[in-house]
Image (cartoon, grey):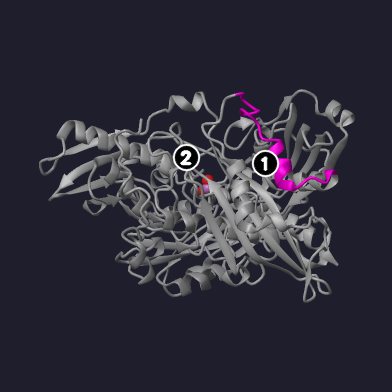
Amino acid sequence: MSDLLRPVAIGRDLVRRDGMDKVTGRARYAYEADVPNASYCRLVQTTVARGRVEAMHTDAARQVDGVRAVITPFTAESLHTDGGELAVLQDQEIAFRGQVIGLVVADTAEAALRAAELVEVTCSTAPHDVALSADRDDLYKPEKVNPSYETDTSDGDVDVAMAAAEVTVEQTYTTAMYHNNPLEPHATTAFWDGEHLTVWDSTQGVHPTRAVLADLFDLDKEHVRVICPYVGGGFGSKGEPHVHVVLAAMAARAVPGRHVKLALTRQQMFSLAGHRTPTIQRMRLAADRIGHLSGIAIDVVEHTAKMKEYAEQTGVPTRMMYAAPNRATTHRLAALDVPAPSWMRAPGECPGMFGPEVAMDELAEALGIDPIELRIRNEPDVDPETGHPFSSRNLVTCLREGAARFGWADRDPRPRAREEDGWYVGTGVASSVYPVNRMAESTATIRFERGAYVVEIGAADLGTGTWTTLAQIAADALGVDVEDVSVRIGDTRYPVASVAGGSSGMTTWGSAVVNAARAFRDKHGSAPADGAEADGSTEDNPATEQYAMYAFGAQFVEAHVHRDTGEIRVPRLLGVFAAGRIINPRTARSQFIGGMTMGLSMALHENSVLDPRHGHVVNHDLAEYHITTCADVTDIEATWLDEHDPHVNPMGTKGIGEIGIVGTAAAVVNAVHHAIGIRVRDLPVTLDKLL
Ligand code: MOS
């Protein structure tokens, strides 16, 4: 399969091709699109969590100097939609606090802001409900969980295994509500030329965004162009268009001939750009005295929005992670008056490896077995869920290699065994896993122009390195120097490509590029004429029916807890990953340590506090929604095995954007427990829980 490749460019530590433009400010992001006749859009949001807009008075707003349009639910154009998140301004119903109920377009951002403040709104209110708990009597079972996994699974009988087991763990773990906070807020610049719509949008997928806009505005796809060369982070929150994209297009239609710019404020991102649902995870582990699991079960309760269902697949990794003959997983949802939850880095696996990996640590402690050894004893020969062999599974090597690098062998397993200058010192470990995802068909075109190769594909680079790594893949697939390959992405003018999501970019787009290169060489040989061209598309991989395909990893954490104050420091993080072939160690390392840092953030800081009285996230800015910064991580290291997997795709890559966040929070909890002897089962780990 991979015989065309000579891995010469692949594996090279090349700098990002877009790096210099980004750090010097030359790279233009969506809000900075260089357009004439710009107008600025400001949104009006509700301050109640449920009810109805009864009236809106816009006279005062319209009188502000420079205001060109004010749009409300009473005046907005009709979209082609049956409801849901994107049916914005289509009726007067209020489904969550912060919902957009109007917009203002003006010649300056200041005038738009002033006018938005002058819009008078009269709402009627109805009782709202945003409180998640596992004992609500209205929990329901969704049909499927994201994106299309079975909701519940059961093999054998976990109840019987629990009753017969020599040792059991039965505990409930919770993860908080979280919000993605990419550096670049969600932003769109929109322009209508007759029935042609052009948007510059900060998105993880120009083609998927185009498809949504074409549907909503009832346009031929060819009449919509979406442009996005650069993204300042997304983490899933830009994986699907949210209402601001639609609103920017509506606003632009109201001011013909003008380009309208709309950026969400940081505060607006806490109600308009999705979030990770809080989860409640009831874990059960059954084992014998030597640590072989006879049963493993997870029962997940989480919230969704009444307006739009999104069911995080939190129980899914428990289905395949460890060998246990009896296994069960369930998902139940409470539909609340909240904005629609959505994707956040490793949806499913990230929260879903928290409960299980802390429970494994609790089991190791109960058994008096080293937590690494316990995991090794439960290593399955084949995928427990499907019975298929793994295309490659190197979790044990990651654990052993990590243990050696981290200095695990000297560890005294007793809590509070180490105290240095008033700080208890502990270490913890957890496993990581992430599936090898392949998205719907993508196509690449390769052309020979003026002595060099040009690859065109409507893919995205949300900071991950796509500009650079696709060139590396193309160079090896063509058998030419990487310096002779240029890449064009981030525009619907280039061939259709899938969303940058599910860590699927390299598998999906890379396969298309390899196929295009193969077609190019077949057609034009190695001395092509100027203008020579060929296409290639991602194809189904029959091996996905025969093998279970996952990346694995092991995360090690050193935590210090102050004896008197409970203050927590994490001076050392190590991740060892088995994620197939690494295209570019520089961009890969950045993805791994970025994920681990985000996992540390989840463990210690992040927590969207939903006020049940008013239905909104009270800490909706970076002053109060705390995230891990550089100062919080002093020594972070990511490394990987030289893994060769012939089954996943022609490159042998597994996807690395998300696995770095999986397991980190559990490793932190386990390290904190080892330090001070207190088991925190509810994230985040804050000092009040350690006193
Ligand atoms: Mo990622 S949450 O699949 O963009």
CA separation in Å, label 1 and label 2: 33 Å
Q: Which mark is residue 583?
A: none
Residue placed under numbered mark 2 in the picture:
80
| Image position, residue 109 (x, y; %) | 45, 71
Front in this rendered view, residue 172 or 338: 172
Residue placed under numbered mark 1 in the picture:
314
Front in this rendered view, residue 204 or 561: 561
Q: Is residue 607 visible?
A: no
Depth check, mark 1 against mark 2: the one in front is 1
- Vertically, is 369 above or below 606? above
- Vertically, is 319 above or below 359? above
* In-image side of 580 versus 44 (left or right): left
Closer to the chain start, of discs 1 and 2, is 2
Front in this rendered view, residue 476 or 282: 476
| Element at label 1 | loop
Q: Residue 374 in magenta? A: yes
Image quadrant in which you'd find residue 20: bottom left
Name which residue type carries label 1.
Thr
| Element at label 2 | loop
Q: Quadrant of the N terminus?
A: top left
| Image position, residue 369 (x, y; %) | 79, 45
Q: Residue 394 in magenta? A: no
**Magenta segment:** 367-387
Disc 2 crowd rating (10 Å Cα; few below 14, some 14-19, many 20+) is some
| Prevailing secondary structure of the magenta residues | loop
Image quadrant in which you'd find residue 575: bottom right
| Image position, residue 490 (x, y; %) | 35, 51
